[in-house]
């Protein structure tokens, strides 16, 4: 009898039968608060009626129309709608299925456009599991170990992570920018550097936000040397951080924006956006794919945009995120093992360290498992899996935030009292 790969490790033992909003129900109809949202994918919640209706209607008309063969209306309409929310000047799009594919498309574009071989990524960043994307990932060895050799031409520079360095934000930023200059001087000279790839908030790297001065420094160096600034908004986009794009917190202008996850409320869809001038430099035939811009996924993305706008979910993310962060900080204040509660909007991490100040993935994992037993689904992240992350759907309300915080408090107390 065939079975799933034993290497696939589930964060919980739940077998989901159905979902509604921020809730999942198992096969015994037990209800769980889902504060994972499919790793930030179900932005409008599970089975939002408007997304379901849009997908059902599209399935009855056209499921797949390969978009380098023929066009279809949901795709064309989606491009028009995205122009309303994309940063100014990013007026050309290419669509794929996953974040990894979109990252590789951005890599291919920037290398072709600049005719330069190297890219610089930032420590703690996660960009995907395919070969090029994994080569650019530094959030953990598990994402790239065991299938070397990986892609060459990738150089790593520090991300301003105050918690890791034990410094202030200003000191961490000074160090990160100084080290970036050192990388450009010693590892990848500017004339051979095609792009910087960076997340506005480290995702798998521990939910660490960047800051305005750091991104201004990247933009200044990119402009000075003709390097393309690629912002990986796969997890931070579509309202997740309390603004439509994570970069909006830092007043930074990207040359390429990468999006996926919350774009289509659970349907596989990703994309990159760039200027007409930059996209025109891609080599003919270098962009394509069988399933990219699937008609049903595009219809779901259009409904997602409608729901986000009509239900004011970006503002809800900001408001509920403030409530959630406050509640989690209150829990942390009673436990020395939780050393930081951080994040933006509905993207919040709780970091665990032991008595010696070392990252404590074992305790973080134990609390995450205890929370699941009590009906709250969460995930861990960070290099040592020492951060428990809260990433609910953007439709979450105050009562659900309170319920989650209460379960979290009980779970933390239960584990730390052992």
Image (cartoon, rainbow, N blue to C red):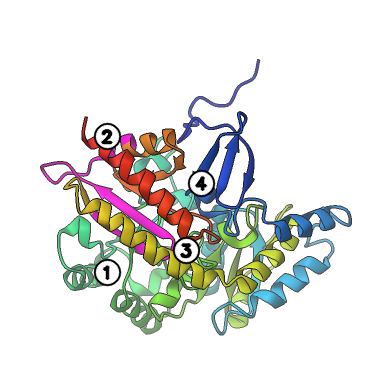
Rounded to the nearest angstrom, the CA distance separating label 1 from label 2 is 41 Å
Q: Secondary structure at mark 1?
A: helix
Q: Is residue 173 magenta?
A: no
Q: Which residues are magenta?
A: 340-366
In primary-sequence order, the first of circles 1 and 4 is 4
Is residue 102 left or right of 133 when viewed as pictured?
Answer: right
List the residue tagged with mark 2: 415
In primary-sequence order, the first of circles 1 and 2 is 1
Rounded to the nearest angstrom, the CA distance separating label 1 from label 4 is 39 Å
Count neighbours of disc 1 (C-alpha within 10 A) and say few if under 14, some if 14 to 19, many if 20 or more: many
Rounded to the nearest angstrom, the CA distance separating label 3 from label 2 is 30 Å
Is residue 362 left or right of 288 when viewed as pictured?
Answer: left
List the residue tagged with mark 1: 180
Is residue 70 left or right of 244 when viewed as pictured?
Answer: right
Q: Quadrant of residue 156?
A: bottom left
1 or 2: mark nearer the eye? 2
In primary-sequence order, the first of circles 4 and 3 is 4
CB contact under 8 Å: marks 1 and 2: no
List the residue tagged with mark 3: 236
Rounded to the nearest angstrom, the CA distance separating label 4 from label 3 is 18 Å
262 up-or-down from 146: above or below: below
Q: Secondary structure at mark 4?
A: strand
List the residue tagged with mark 4: 34
352 up-or-down from 3: above or below: below
Is residue 120 visible from the viewing direction of this image?
no
Count neighbours of disc 3 (C-alpha within 10 A) and say few if under 14, some if 14 to 19, many if 20 or more: many
3 or 1: mark nearer the eye? 3
Q: Is residue 353 magenta?
A: yes
For image coordinates 26% across by 51% down, the residue present is 331
1 or 4: mark nearer the eye? 4
């Amino acid at each position: 009898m065939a079975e799933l790969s034993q290497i696939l490790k589930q964060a919980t033992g739940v077998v989901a039968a159905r979902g509604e909003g921020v809730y999942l129900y198992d096969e015994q109809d037990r209800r769980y608060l889902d504060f994972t949202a499919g790793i930030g994918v179900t932005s409008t919640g599970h089975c939002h009626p408007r997304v379901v209706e849009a997908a059902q209607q599209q399935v009855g008309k056209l499921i797949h129309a390969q978009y380098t063969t023929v066009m279809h209306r949901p795709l064309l309409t989606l491009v028009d709608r995205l122009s309303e929310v994309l940063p100014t000047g990013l007026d050309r799009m290419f669509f794929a299925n996953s974040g990894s594919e979109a990252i590789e498309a951005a890599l291919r574009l920037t290398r072709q456009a600049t005719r330069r071989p190297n890219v610089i990524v930032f420590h703690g960043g996660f960009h995907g599991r395919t070969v090029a994307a994994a080569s650019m990932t530094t959030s953990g060895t598990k994402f790239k170990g065991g299938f070397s050799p990986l892609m060459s031409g990738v150089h790593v520079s520090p991300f301003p992570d105050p918690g890791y360095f034990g410094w202030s934000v200003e000191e961490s930023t000074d160090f990160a920018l100084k080290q970036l200059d050192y990388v450009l001087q010693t590892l990848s000279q500017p004339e051979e550097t095609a792009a910087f790839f960076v997340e506005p908030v480290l995702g798998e790297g521990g939910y660490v936000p960047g800051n305005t001065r750091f991104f201004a420094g990247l933009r200044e160096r990119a402009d000075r040397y003709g390097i393309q600034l690629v912002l990986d908004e796969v997890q931070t986009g579509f309202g997740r951080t309390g603004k439509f794009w994570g970069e909006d917190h830092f007043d930074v202008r990207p040359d390429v924006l990468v999006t996926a996850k919350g774009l289509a409320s659970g349907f596989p869809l990703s994309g990159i956006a760039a200027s007409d001038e930059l996209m025109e430099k891609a080599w003919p035939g270098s962009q394509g794919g069988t399933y990219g811009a699937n008609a049903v996924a595009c219809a779901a993305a259009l409904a997602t945009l409608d729901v986000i706008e009509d239900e004011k979910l970006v503002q809800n993310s900001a408001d509920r995120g403030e409530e959630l962060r406050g509640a989690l900080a209150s829990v942390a204040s009673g436990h020395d093992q939780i050393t930081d509660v951080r994040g933006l909007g509905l993207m919040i991490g709780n970091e665990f360290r032991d008595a010696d100040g070392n990252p404590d993935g074992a305790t973080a994992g134990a609390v995450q498992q205890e929370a699941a037993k009590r009906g709250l689904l969460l995930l861990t992240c960070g290099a040592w899996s020492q951060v428990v992350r809260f990433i609910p759907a953007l439709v979450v309300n105050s009562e659900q935030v309170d319920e989650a915080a209460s379960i979290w408090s009980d779970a933390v107390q239960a584990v730390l009292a052992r």
